[in-house]
């Protein structure tokens, strides 16, 4: 145990200084104290997090018909609804598109959502992300034909009325 504490102390003395990735002078608490990964020894937590994030992004994704630039697709884990999921420090996770929005634009105001203008849930391209309310999101779904159940001519009862079971109504 004493040997472990000595190695951590030596590592802490080495790390009080500039981050090798961003060049900013950081305090010891802003570095990850690890003896298992010497390549991370002089890199701050924020830079390591960014390196991890960008390693999971493909900037050559598909270009959606109504967009001028390609989607930056999230390649790692996904949330149950299909959105990218990014692990933060500890056991906390954040949706990848929200992390990307905050990285490029700052904090998300309370009560607002980050909406995908490209309709691609795995996209983290900040040019494709915007803020909106829940009502804005619902309006986009209807305007872009992503609303279920389908209405009018898109409804199966309209296109194939013979497949709908019809009988006497009781009651």
Image: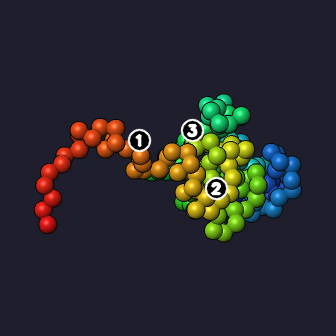
Q: Residue at x 57, y 38 (%)?
A: 75
Nearer the observer: mark 2 or 3; the answer is 2
Query: Along the line of sight, which residue is nearer the eye, 101 or 162?
Result: 162
Kindly indicate the quadrant of the structure image that contains residue 170.
Answer: bottom left
Nearer the observer: mark 1 or 3; the answer is 1
Residue 114, label in figure = 2
One can see residue 44 in this view:
no
Residue 153, label in figure = 1
Kindly indicate the quadrant of the structure image that contains residue 161.
Answer: top left
Q: Quadrant of the N terminus?
A: bottom right
Q: Residue at x 51, y 45 (%)?
A: 145
CA neighbours of label 3 inside 10 A, class few (<14), some (14 to 19), many (20+): some
Q: CA distance from mark 2 to mark 3?
A: 19 Å
Q: Secondary structure at mark 3?
A: loop
Of marks 2 and 3, which one's residue comes earlier in the chain?
Answer: 3
Query: Along the line of sight, which residue is nearer the eye, 166 or 29?
Result: 166
Horizontal and vertical percent position of residue 12: 76, 58
Circles 2 and 3: CB distance less than 8 Å?
no
**Tag 3 residue:** 75
Residue 11, label in figure = none
Q: Residue furthest bottom?
A: 110
Horizontal and vertical percent position of residue 91: 54, 60
Q: Secondary structure at mark 2?
A: strand
Circles 2 and 1: CB distance less than 8 Å?
no
Residue 79 higher or lower than 59, as above or below: below
Query: Along the line of sight, which residue is nearer the eye, 148 or 31?
Result: 148
Of marks 1 and 3, which one's residue comes earlier in the chain?
Answer: 3
CA neighbours of label 1 inside 10 A, class few (<14), some (14 to 19), many (20+): few
Q: Residue at x 56, y 48 (%)?
A: 143
Q: Residue at x 73, y 44 (%)?
A: 127
Horizontal and vertical percent position of residue 111: 63, 68
Q: CA distance from mark 2 to mark 1?
A: 31 Å
């Amino acid at each position: 145990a004493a040997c472990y504490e000595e190695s951590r102390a030596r590592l802490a003395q080495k790390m009080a200084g500039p981050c090798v990735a961003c060049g900013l002078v950081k305090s010891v608490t802003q570095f990850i104290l690890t003896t298992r990964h010497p390549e991370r020894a002089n890199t701050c937590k924020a830079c390591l997090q960014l390196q991890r994030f960008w390693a999971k992004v493909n900037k050559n994704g598909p270009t959606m018909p109504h967009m001028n630039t390609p989607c930056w697709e999230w390649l790692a884990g996904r949330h149950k609804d299909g959105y990218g999921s990014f692990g933060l420090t500890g056991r906390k996770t954040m949706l990848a598109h929200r992390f990307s929005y905050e990285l490029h634009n700052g904090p998300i105001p309370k009560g607002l959502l980050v909406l995908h203008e490209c309709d691609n849930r795995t996209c983290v391209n900040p040019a494709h992300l915007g803020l909106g309310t829940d009502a804005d999101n619902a309006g986009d779904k209807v305007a872009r034909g992503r609303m279920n159940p389908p209405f009018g001519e898109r409804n199966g009862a309209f296109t194939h009325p013979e497949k709908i079971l019809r009988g006497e109504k009781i009651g």
